[in-house]
Image (cartoon, grey):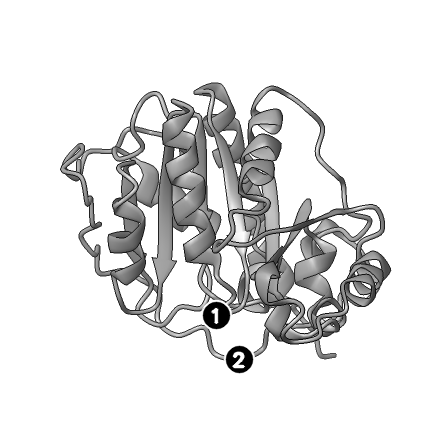
Amino acid sequence: MCRTVDLQQAVLARNDGSARELRAALTARGTVAVNLLSSPGSGKTALLELELGLARERAVPVAALTADLATENDATRLGRSGVPVKQVLTDGLCHLEAVMLAGHLDGWLPEPTRLLFVENVGNLVCPASYDLGESLRVVLASVTEGEDKPLKYPTAFGLANLVLVTKSDLAAAVDFDEAGFRANVARVNPGVEVLLTSARTGEGVGALLDRALAVLEGAPVHQPVMGRPSAGHTHSHGQVDTHSHGPVDTHGHAPVDTHGHAPVDTHSHGLVDRH
């Protein structure tokens, strides 16, 4: 008799365990993680630049970790804000996992960081099912990507606590159907808030920071109807990531600390006990 082993479910269940440990560790030190997911070119980095600058103006202790396949360009841009920034190079891996994030935070995350923005790899498929221990998952889509993006990527949008529309200043130029987009978001994630943002005009920048700070103060977040695949749901989540994830980053890339803050500490600080 043949026996089928669902490796995807096992991998996600293991990741969820690590994510719960990381979330608990971050909560214990008074830090809220904000996981930013989007496709490449959505304007995620540009918006995050403004968020970090605004947080600094408001004297909010904030840090950012940005993941990319091959370059350190995003860390260089974000570092101009003056807050601690760390680059993670994934060497082709298309998403972050909780244990990877915990490993990169060990010995680096400055005290007292209250908000940690995690800029995930630009991809709406691979990262969608991986809980990183965040307390606020934000999914972004630009007006240039079309109104049906939520229907094409139901897992990503269906698991969001907050949805952002970026590049709103271009909406008229590309005939963006805001009502249609909102309706499509509601089909995969009823009740989730949708905010319009623009890195050019500043629209929505303060609103995102306010939402993150509210979570830090204990405000409840939107709970999506759709649970993660590893949560035991039997219905289809629309997408299964079946392509190669590329090599795992096992090379210990030296993180880019663009401000000279806290040189990389190779000692374990036990942010998460992964044993």
User: Which badge, 2 or 1, comes first in the chain's sequence?
Assistant: 1
In front of the other: 246 or 47: 47
Label 2 amino acid? Answer: His
Determine whether 75 is above or below 215 in the image.
below
Q: CA distance from mark 2 to mark 1?
A: 18 Å
Q: Quadrant of the C terminus?
A: top left
Determine whether 140 is above or below 261 in the image.
below
Image quadrant where residue 134 sits: top right
Image quadrant where residue 38 sits: bottom right
Per the image, the residue denoted by label 2 is 243
In front of the other: 248 or 199: 199
Give SS at disc 1: loop
Could you classify mark 2 by the number of other residues whose Cα lies within 10 Å: few (under 14), some (14-19), or many (20 or more)?
A: few
| Residue 275 shows in the view | no
User: 273 left or right of 168?
Assistant: left
* Residue 20, horizontal then vertical, whole percent: 56, 36
User: 189 left or right of 140?
Assistant: right
User: 9 left or right of 111?
Assistant: right
Label 1 amino acid? Answer: Pro
Determine whether 150 is above or below 164 in the image.
below
Could you classify mark 1 by the number of other residues whose Cα lies within 10 Å: few (under 14), some (14-19), or many (20 or more)?
A: few
Per the image, the residue denoted by label 1 is 40
